[in-house]
Every structure is written in C-alpha cells, then in structure tokens.
Image (tube, rainbow, N blue to C red):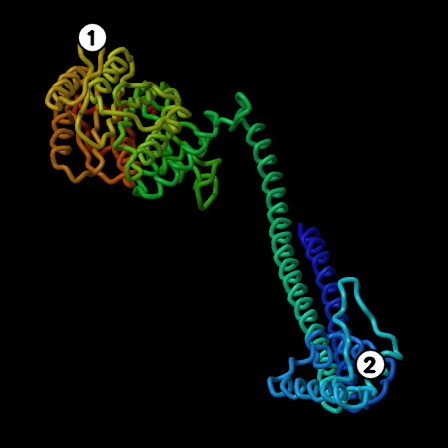
Amino acid sequence: MRRRVERVVGEYDRKVAELDAVHRHDDADVARRIAELEARLAQARAVDWSRLPSGEFLDEVRSALLLPDASWNRPPAPPSFLERLRALFRRLAAWFRGLFGRRTRPAPEPPSGRRVVFAVPAAGGRTLGASEVGEALARMNDAERHELSERVESDLRSQERTLEREAEEKRRAAEAQRRQIEAERAEARQKAESDGENQVRDATERRLERELKERGFVAERAGELVVTYGLVERFARLLLEEESRKLPGDLRLSLRGGGSTGIYEKARLRRPEEVAHLDVPGSLLEARLAGLRHIDESTSYVYREVTAERVHVVLAFDRSGSMAENGKLEAAKKALLALYVAVRRRYPDATVDLLAFDNEVRVLDLVELWECPAGAFTNTAEALRTAHLLLRASRASRREVYLITDGLPEAYTDEDGRVRSGALDVAMERALERARELATVTPLKSTVLLLKSEHPEYEVAARSIARTLGGEMVVTEPTRLGVELLVRWAHGTETERRVAAPAPPPAKAAPAGGRGRRRRADRRMGG
C-alpha cells in the first residue's frame, strides 16, 4: 500500500515540476520582451521624426499615421463668419475688377495650412509604403511630429501593458492549474490510502470469515452471514468471566465447581474444574508422605460426584418497548447469557429455558436470545403461566425461575386467547393469579429482578409478585444485573454436603444417634 501511494504522489509531483518549469520559462520570456520594449521606447524618444526612421519603428509609425483621430486625419475646420465675409468681399472685388477692368488671370489661392492628410483605414485594411511614410513625415510640422512621437510611445507602452496583462493571466492560469493538481494529488493520495485500507480490511474480513466458518461460529444462509450457537456461547463465556471478576472470591470458586449431587467419591484430581471440591487435608498429607513440600496434581484428591443432580432453570425476561431505553434490553441479554453458561458449567445436563415476553411469550435459544428485539406491552401473567407449565412437567430436584422486568404488568391473555392491554388492574390481578399457580411447584426457588425506575408503583407490583411466588425481589441497575443474577444463583439451595478429612478417633464415644448419622453421611460422601 505504501509503494502505491508513493507512486501516485510521485506522478503528481512530476506534473507540478513540469508546470513550474513552464511557468519559469514564460516569466523569463515575458521579462525579456518587456526589456526589449523598454529599450525600443528609449530609442523612440531619440528619433528624428522629420525623416523616415529605421525599419524597427516603421510599423508603429505606419499605424500612428492611419489613426482616424490624429490631427492630420481630421477634416478641416469650417471657416468662421469673418473668414466667410472676407471671402465674399474678395469675390465681389474680383467681380468688379472683371467688370470694369482688364481681364487678368486669377491668382492661386494661398495654402490652407494643412499639409498632411490620410484616409481612415478601410475594413479590408490599408497600408502605407515607406515612400509615403517618408513623404508624410517630411510634410509634417513640429506639432504634428511631436504628436506622432507621443502616439508611437503610447503604442509601445500599450504593447508593454498588453504583454504584462497576458503574463499575469498566464500566471493566474498556472497557479489555478497548480492548485488543481495539488487538490487532485491530495484526493488521489486519500483514494490510494483508502483503497489500500479497504484491500487490507477486505482481506482481513475474508480471513476472519473463513476462520469463523471453519470454527463453526458463523454460517452462510441466503447469501448472508449469520451467527451460530457456538459463537454466542463463546461470547457468553466471556461475559461470565467478566461478570465473575465483580464477585467475591468464594462465589467465583463456587461458580467454577461441578454441580452438587450429595453423593461423592474421593479420587485423584482429573480436571481443573474439580479444584472446587479439593480435599485439602488429605492432599497435604499425601504430599508429605511423598516427600513434597507443596500439593501438586499427583497428590491432589477431590470429592467427585457419583450421581448427577437434576436441575431445571427458567430465565424469563421482559422485552417490552420500554426495555429498549437506556440499554436495559442489552444488559438483560448479557446477564442471561452469563447465567446460562454458569448453570451449564456447574450442571452440564441441566435444563435451561429462555423466555422472552411482551404481548406473547417465546422460548428462545442462545442465538435467538441475542437477536431478540424489543416488542410491545408487558404480559407478565403469560410469562409466569409458561414457566409454570415448564417446571410442573419437570422431574428435576432443583427448580429455579428468574424473572427480569422493568415495569408493571400491562397486558394479559383472556379466556379466548386474545391479548388485552390497557387495564393495569386486570393485568396485575392475572399476574398474581399465575404467580400463585407457579408457587405450587415444589421445590422452587424464585427471584424477581426489577430494573430501577423513577416510579415507586413498579417496585410495589414487583414485590407483590415476588411475595406471591414465595421468593425474593431485587431492585438493581442494568449494569449490576449480571452480578445480581450470579449471586442469587451461587447462593441457591444446594444438596451438597462436604465432610472433613479423616481424623483421629474421638476420645469420647458419640451417642448412638450421632454415630448412625455420621456413618450415613460417610457413605453418602464416599469417605
């Protein structure tokens, strides 16, 4: 890309250099011609106009002699009244002399005083020969010669001004052309850089598209790229890691471990995720017996589950039109993705249902969750009814429901299956009715998360729904939603029971009931 830009800029630099060379040549030529005119003007002031000048001024003299407004080309002035009266008396005197006297030959009239007369040049043009010019100069008086000298000098000055004006126009044209070349160079440079960046970006996009396709993160459908479940899940893992940094250390550790079953076996460490169930005293004892100062993988013992606990989680979020404000919908999506991955990490076989509700309820997968847009009104009753149907048919021993909303129930579904909106009291009553139905599912842990609002009645409604469900209610900011979900999930009801490492027998015998309970606990923990 850099070479291409340099090549384009170099081409325009060459054009600018050529233009500067022509401009310098024109300036030198104009300066030379002006100097020649100045020299001719100095020579014209020293010419004797009583005779034919040298050939270099012949054109200027010929042009001056043919000027219509020159004094020698003007028609004679009409005679004055006194001159006409004198002429009349002369004619009368001549008549009387002819009548009474002897006839004599009339005397020639005295010259009128105008000795040089030239016609105005015709349209086809008229020129004067050298002999005619010399004759005209010889017949001129001093005033006419002075006028001729001024007219020749004026012609030379006019030529000089014309030359300077033409030179100035050329300079302006050259400057405009230079500015145009500079603008074209800047545009060409920008275009070359943009083309280069586009080529790099296109190559990067093609490479990234190819890699994403190879890894199964995107797929091509109808000529367009669409995200896949794998990409959204990968993104969800990153969201979980980001949200986990805001949690206390014990909660982060609990999110990394496997699910709780209540039945464990003691065995060596196999996967890093099993560190959450590390038998620290037993591992230290094994390390000391092996002559090691620290625990390593060969001396680490963990409590591993024998049977998996069945878990069913329903994540319902409000996607009404108000959720599109202040980034609430995006925050809910990110929080649910993070919680989805947290549930799957601890319980790989868990059932996780994602519900999006506005006027209606939709069950989504991860891709549909991320692409889910904002909708219409809030039909909380229908979301609770769908959660009840899902959890009622579940055979899981741990059932949880999380409801995320930002306002009041605004809509409900009537007996005919039509969605009604506007009657807030009826919508609230239907929501409480569906909450009482959902509360009949046992065991059940429910949490209602309300995004903060300026309306206090929203919190009252959310608290009523949470109280009817027999769960808890949390009021939080959109930016804290992910943390609140993970905290509630990590503090959920667990059947996990940990036992201490083998200890020396007690000094006193325990009661029979306590001894039986300890044996049952040891059998359940695999100790």
Q: In front: 347, or 111?
A: 111
- Quarter where residue 195 is shown: top right
Above-or-below relation of 16 to 187: below
Above-or-below relation of 338 to 57: above
Determine if residue 265 is in view. no
**Outermost residue, top side:** 416
How many residues crowd around disc 1 within 10 Å: few (fewer than 14), some, or many (20 or more)? few
Residue placed under numbered mark 2 in the picture: 57
Q: Residue at x 64, y 84 (%)?
A: 84
| Mark 1 to mark 2 CA distance (whole Å) | 115 Å
Residue placed under numbered mark 1 in the picture: 416
Q: Position of residue 482 (x, y in %)?
A: 31, 36
**Outermost residue, front side:** 100
Q: Position of residue 25 (x, y in %)?
A: 77, 71
Q: Residue at x 23, y 33 (%)?
A: 506
Amino acid type at image mark 1: Asp
Q: Position of residue 69 (x, y in %)?
A: 68, 76
Q: Point out the frontmost of discs 1 and 2.
A: 2
Q: Position of residue 333 (x, y in %)?
A: 34, 31
For numbered disc 2, what is the local secondary structure?
helix
Determine if residue 241 is in view. yes
Q: Do labels 1 and 2 touch, CB within 8 Å?
A: no
